Amino acid sequence: MSKVLLFGEPMAMFTAETEGPLEEVELFRRSLAGAEVNVCTGLARLGHEVSYVTKLGQDPMALYIKNFLNREGIGTEFLTFDPIYKTATQLKSKVSEGDPVVAYYRKGSAFSHTSAADIDQIKLENVELVHVTGIPPALSLSCREATFRLIDRAKERGITITFDPNLRPSLWESEDAMIKVINEIATKADLILPGVSEGLILTGTDDPEKIADFYQNLGVKEVIVKLGSKGAYVRTESESFYQEGFKVEKVIDTVGAGDGFAVGVITGKLEGLSIQDTITRANAIGAIQVTFVSDNEGLPTREELDHFIASHQK
């Protein structure tokens, strides 16, 4: 049984080979997308046992995803297949600056039909940490119930819960619903990882220290506010500090950087690193990831990570 559990929707991603509007692109390259599967991949590459709770269709893209998970050494014992609904996909534009345009094809997907009853089938023995994001509760009401069921079951067993809001406003029925649900999940988490722009939406301020105040007042023990290329602001029960990020020569694609950051935080906690060393690792993986087009291609092995940190520290 894996020590880390993640719950989410993987998608076959088709990235444009040429720049321009998606409707004009002729050629696409296939890869795998999904915040939670990115984190799974990063954890596995750093040698951690991780299992992925998801539901796919019975279709070629589902087999592609299953093969990817097997190849990366990610546990698939909680992978189920739906005979009716299909695996989600997405298109992503190619850009030389700014963020790419992403078109989702996930409404009514197999995963969106996940229910709380599905979560009840999962064994949580030996699980040390459950990582959740704000994406599954946006996909459907049944996924929302499933997310809360997983969190509540983990809390009953004393399992550490880390939470990345990962806001996707286009997937929610309203911004008010998004804010309410995300902040309700936060009250149940041990650690939350909002980006500074997400903090503005969720708390009404983009001041990292006030964002930390907001979540600690809700009872969250640790708040780590992601500041992009500037690094992170950290607030634990006993200390608070800013930590600078790493500089990279060229940013290729910012998608997946936050997931890489989460990998650094989770593995640092699992390995008992100091909070400073944990954030150094998180910043490093985020920086590595922005130099790759794919959402998870650049996630490093331990050797690659150690080399990056050693060669970039002052």
Image (tube, helix red, strand yellow):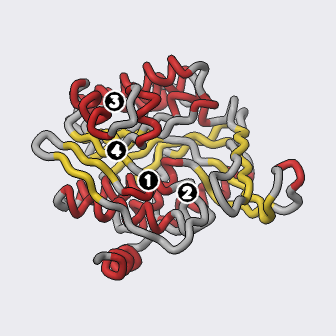
Q: Which residue is mark 2?
A: 254
How far apart marks 1 and 4 lie (CA) works out to: 9 Å
Residue 155 position in % (x across, y down):
25, 31
Are the residues flagged by discs 2 and 3 in contact, CB closer than 8 Å?
no
Mark number, residue 225 = 4
Residue 49 position in % (x across, y down):
35, 59
How far apart marks 1 and 3 lie (CA) works out to: 21 Å
Ranked by sequence position, the earlier of labels 2 and 3 is: 3
Viewer can see residue 300: yes
Number of numbered markers: 4
Ranked by sequence position, the earlier of labels 1 and 2 is: 1
Q: Nearer the viewer, residue 61 or 185?
A: 185
Tag 3: amino acid: Ala
How far apart marks 2 and 3 lie (CA) works out to: 25 Å
Q: Which residue is mark 3?
A: 186
Tag 1: amino acid: Gly
Instruction: Please determine whether, in this image, residue 66 is positioned above or below residue 211.
Output: below
Q: Which residue is mark 1?
A: 228
- Residue 24 lies left or right of residue 268; in this view the side is right
Judged by depth in the image, the label closer to the viewer, 2 or 3, is: 2
How far apart marks 1 and 2 lie (CA) works out to: 9 Å
Ranked by sequence position, the earlier of labels 1 and 3 is: 3
Q: Nearer the viewer, residue 314 or 186?
A: 314
Q: Quadrant of residue 193?
A: top left
Q: Nearer the viewer, residue 304 or 116?
A: 304
Are the residues flagged by discs 2 and 4 in contact, CB closer than 8 Å?
no
Q: Which residue sits at x=64%, y=48%?
A: 11
Are the residues flagged by discs 1 and 2 in contact, CB closer than 8 Å?
yes
How far apart marks 2 and 4 lie (CA) works out to: 17 Å
